[in-house]
Image (tube, rainbow, N blue to C red):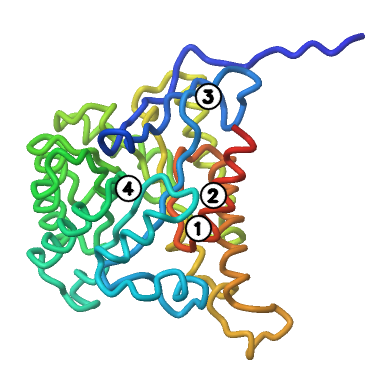
Amino acid sequence: MAFKAVPQKFAAKINALTIGTGEREISLGGENVFPFYSFDAPIENRPKIGIEIHDRGHYAGVPGMDAYYAGADTLAQTAKRAAAAEGADFLAVSFDGAHPDNGDRSVEDCVAAIKEVADAVDIPLVIEGSKHIEKDAKLFEKIAEALSGRNILVMSAREENYKGIAASVGLAYSQKIGAESAVDINLAKQLNVLISQMGVKSENTAMNLGSAAAGYGFEYVASTVDRVKAAALAQNDTMLQMPIVTPVGSEAWTVKESIVSQEDFPEWGPREIRGINMEVSTAAACLAAGSNAVILRHPESVKTISKLVSQLS
């Protein structure tokens, strides 16, 4: 008996969220099929890849990245180099230097730096904070104001500070918001509900469900993303239909396999190759589970994942 394919597409769909402006703007989400199921229905927007830098430059100490960013002495110069990386769809700027334990860079300094970045590049911008609840709330408000009209995505609004971020970033300055939770479908949905109750449209919100490097409890990440997508599409749960953006680099480049020296573990090979492999493996797994965008650090990882997405889309 001949095989007859039965398409599995849904009446519900993931919200399409647009960031950036002009010819470089990108849209995340919009699909009504499971990840890469283009054989069931056309996928409106392929997954996107971001490249991450931080306010103290790039993530130094890795030969390939050091060589790629050689001569880029300011954040704006680093941003310009990152934006030119093959396969990069958007630029993610992390302000970890604003954390009180990492230099406590002032909000004013951060705003001045991001304005220089915005003037230097036309690629869509995603703003990551310092991971300090109080500092980030102030930082995000001022950056949203300074970049009014650039249609940025601000990561991350958490349960502890979502009210201020929703009011300023989402409502006052009409920027996009990333809702960050900790690898739990119920927490993710609850935060989305709270943000929507503040008046921010669901179409202007993305989700950061959390991540882990491949092999480090990643099964929780995969199952959570999978459950979110299933609820959004099969059950038409409107509070889980936001596109998913997953920061991968911050996880992949901090685990043992990526940071120990070759001298300590000669059988593991060069550290940089291990880091790239961890980043690529994690990003590919996140995209297969249902992430609509991943944020990476190494230009080689960005290029590799971009080619993978192009071949599967």
Which of the marked residues, 4 or 1, is nearer the chain's N terminus?
4
Q: Position of residue 43 (x, y in %)?
A: 52, 24
Which of the marked residues, 3 or 4, is nearer the chain's N terminus?
3
Density class for disc 4 (Cα within 10 Å; few <14, some 14-19, many ≥20) is many
Which residue corresponds to the image point at 55% horizontal and 19% vertical from the top-left?
Answer: 42
Q: Position of residue 148 (x, y in %)?
A: 12, 42
Which of the marked residues, 3 or 2, is nearer the chain's N terminus?
3
Q: According to the image, label 2 marks what residue?
A: 220
Give the spatial CA distance, label 4 vs label 1.
Answer: 14 Å
Instruction: Name the residue furthest bottom.
Output: 263
Image-based side of 240 in relation to 211, left or right: left
Q: Are marks 2 and 1 in contact (CB under 8 Å)?
A: yes
Which residue corresponds to the image point at 54% horizontal and 46% vertical from the top-left?
Answer: 306
Q: According to the image, label 1 marks what residue?
A: 212
Image-based side of 245 in relation to 261, left or right: left
Give the spatial CA distance, label 2 vs label 1.
Answer: 9 Å
> Element type at marker 2?
helix
Give the spatial CA distance, label 3 vs label 4.
Answer: 25 Å
Q: Are marks 4 and 2 in contact (CB under 8 Å)?
A: no
> Element type at marker 4?
strand
Residue type of the residue flagged with mark 3:
Ile
Q: According to the image, label 4 marks what residue?
A: 180
The answer to which image quadrant residue 24 occupies is top left
Please, is residue 260 above or below residue 313 in the view? Answer: below
Q: According to the image, label 3 marks what residue?
A: 43
> Element type at marker 1?
loop
Residue type of the residue flagged with mark 1:
Ala
